[in-house]
Image (cartoon, coloured by chain):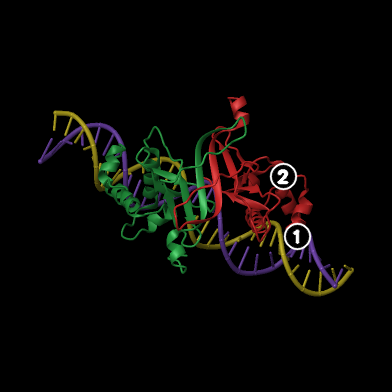
Chain colours: A red, B green, C yellow, D purple
Amino acid sequence: MYAKDARSLLKEHSLSVTEGRLRILELFLRANGALSHADIEKAGDAPFDRVTVYRTLQSFVEKGLLHPIPTSDNTVRYALCNDTCTEAHHQDDHVHFVCNHCGKTVCLDHIAVPSVHLPTGFSPRQVQVIVNGVCDACQRAPRGPKA
Amino acid sequence: MYAKDARSLLKEHSLSVTEGRLRILELFLRANGALSHADIEKAGDAPFDRVTVYRTLQSFVEKGLLHPIPTSDNTVRYALCNDTCTEAHHQDDHVHFVCNHCGKTVCLDHIAVPSVHLPTGFSPRQVQVIVNGVCDACQRAPRGPKA
DNA sequence: TGGTTTGTGCAACATTGTTGCAAATCTTTT
DNA sequence: AAAAGATTTGCAACAATGTTGCACAAACCA
């Protein structure tokens, strides 16, 4: 799915390649779900400065590498954008699935976003769909992974 | 739309009627959009303690009076639930519209939530749709109200 | 390689959310 | 209507989260 390596992804998005950015980006490449700020900070081997994480995530979002996922709890999560995102143009109309069982958030890139019929006067720019429920993994293993 | 008065709403949702709860609930009844924690704290005449606001919002959500709206920035917003919500059962599958111009969030209760086709193994419980764009008010008045 | 630009880490701070407890308020019962 | 009991409020202190300025270090470009 995301065949590219961290280094080239950074370059493609005109971000200078640094140790920290590589590490953070690789976390995302490995994670099959979305990550919150806290996830990254706690992420094992790499004791990043909090500030660095904030700034890194921020520039990743600006440069079209990550996109924020809306959540109802107070934690913003980020996921890798699909290939078509650039700094100038984000195309993030996709469906996110939040599992109530294991807490994982996944990005269902390939699912089509249904069209919404809005009242007159409202012009949509971006449509995000958040589905809560039970994910496939938890469905199979009732005593779920995490939460 | 929300013809009920604050007092009876509280009672119906088995919440004891207090000064603060009435005031906060009335803010929601008057607001035609969603409110964030900060909105309420700053809300004019009522200098509530921060803690009270937190706890009030929390119990309102628990008792099915309000529901949280997912957002991409870090601020949770709340909106009044429709009549069918109770403590036991929330029915909050609706469309929220966030205006990029004035920043207002409105709850498009009457708009049907499109059905999403999920991959096998995923079972949905709740579907929330967040649409960004320009709202009807800002459409008409290019130099928008707030932001 | 050297100079310039950009990113990092530290420290200090600002904001936001949480918890325990005593005083105030609401509800219910007498 | 008043008193007892339950719930809510506000304060204080704390914890967690996010922000800013600046010196130093690392990356980029020629």
Residue for point 59% across, 49% down: A93
Question: Closest to the observer: A120 or A67?
Answer: A120
Determine the chain carrying the residue at label 1: A
Location of residue B87 with respect to A45 vertically, above or below: above
Q: Is residue A61 visible?
A: yes
Task: Please state which amino acid type lies under the numbered disc 2.
Answer: Leu
Determine the chain carrying the residue at label 2: A
Task: Tell me where residue B14 appears, x and y as whole percent.
Answer: 30, 36
| Sequence order check, earlier mark of 2 and 1 | 1
Question: Closest to the observer: B138 or A46?
Answer: B138
Residue for point 27% across, 49% down: B19
Q: In the structure shown, which secondary structural element does the residue marked by tag 2 occupy?
A: helix
Location of mark 2 (residue): A29
Q: Residues within 10 Å of mark 1 (few under 14, many from 20)?
A: few
Residue for point 69% across, 53% down: A84
Q: Is residue A147 visible?
A: no
Task: Tell me where residue B140 appears, x and y as whole percent.
Answer: 44, 65
Task: Please state which amino acid type lies under the numbered disc 1.
Answer: Ser
Location of mark 1 (residue): A16
Q: Is residue B87 left or right of residue A28?
A: left
Q: Is residue B92 left or right of residue D10?
A: right
Task: Tell me where residue B84 appears, x and y as whole percent.
Answer: 36, 37
Q: In the structure shown, which secondary structural element does the residue marked by tag 1 occupy?
A: loop
Question: Closest to the observer: B108 or A119?
Answer: A119
Residue for point 40% across, 41% down: B61
Q: Which mark is residue B26?
A: none
Q: Residues within 10 Å of mark 2 (few under 14, many from 20)?
A: some
Q: Is residue B66 left or right of residue C7?
A: left
Task: Tell me where residue C29 appears, x and y as whole percent.
Answer: 18, 29
Question: In which image quadrant can residue B7 be found?
Answer: top left
Location of residue B22 with respect to B127 vertically, above or below: below
